[in-house]
Amino acid sequence: MTPFDCYKLYLSLKNHFTKNNYDYHKYCGKTRASLESFYKRKDRFFYEKLSRQKTDKEIEAFFVSNFVSCSDPQSLWIGEIIRNGEEKHKEWSKKIQSLSYLFKEEVESIFSGQNFDEFFKIENNRHPIILKKHLQGNLSLETLLILEKILGYKKHFDKKLEDPIWQIVSMKLNKYTPFLNIDVFRYKKILKESLL
């Protein structure tokens, strides 16, 4: 991957995670960036460095992990990714490699001995318990995503919650889903076993 390709990948993934109408997969990562504009950038060194250090797939995963783990993808700058990104990427990779274990642990710790349906109830436009648990850091975005794949609760939340916090989480779920390969049958089984 050339430094310019690395820059285009960064832009397309940033657009994917910050704009409702842009889909990285649908548009095959295309952007309107020009080579001239790239060479005018003062931060092009970061893209050159990254393109030499990692393979194409690694760079994509590196950017995805950073956009997913930051609170505001819109303000995520390449300099910050280069400075703190490696640590975030390692944490994310560990999480993805042990995703079924993480899911089982989180589901058991949160739902054990509780009424499962209560976690998804929305009353008076208040955040449901499941969302509160995520915002408190007790439930990962990945577990929320897997539960969405199994239960399909997001459409209901989107209709009922007119809330900027939920809109951010909802968009993150939408944008993150294509990057994770979830075996729904396997996770359904883990969920059933964990709730017994």
Image (tube, rainbow, N blue to C red):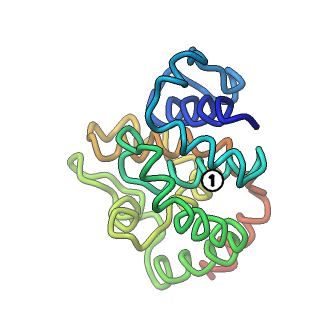
Quadrant where the N terminus sits is top right
Q: Which corner quadrant of the image does residue 60 belong to?
A: top right
Q: Is residue 122 above or below residue 41?
A: below
Residue at disc 1, secondary structure: helix
Residue at image coords 41%, 47%: 169
What residue did someone put label 1 on?
62
Would residue 142 appear left or right of 156 to someone viewing this image? right
The answer to which of 17 and 164 lies nearer the viewer is: 17
Residue at image coords 68%, 65%: 96
Rendering coords of residue 176 (x, y %):
58, 45
Residue at image coords 63%, 34%: 9
The answer to which of 82 and 180 lies nearer the viewer is: 82
Q: Which corner quadrant of the image does residue 45 belong to?
A: top right
How many residues crowd around disc 1 within 10 Å: few (fewer than 14), some, or many (20 or more)? many
Rendering coords of residue 188 (x, y %):
71, 64
Residue at image coords 66%, 66%: 93
**Amino acid under label 1?**
Phe
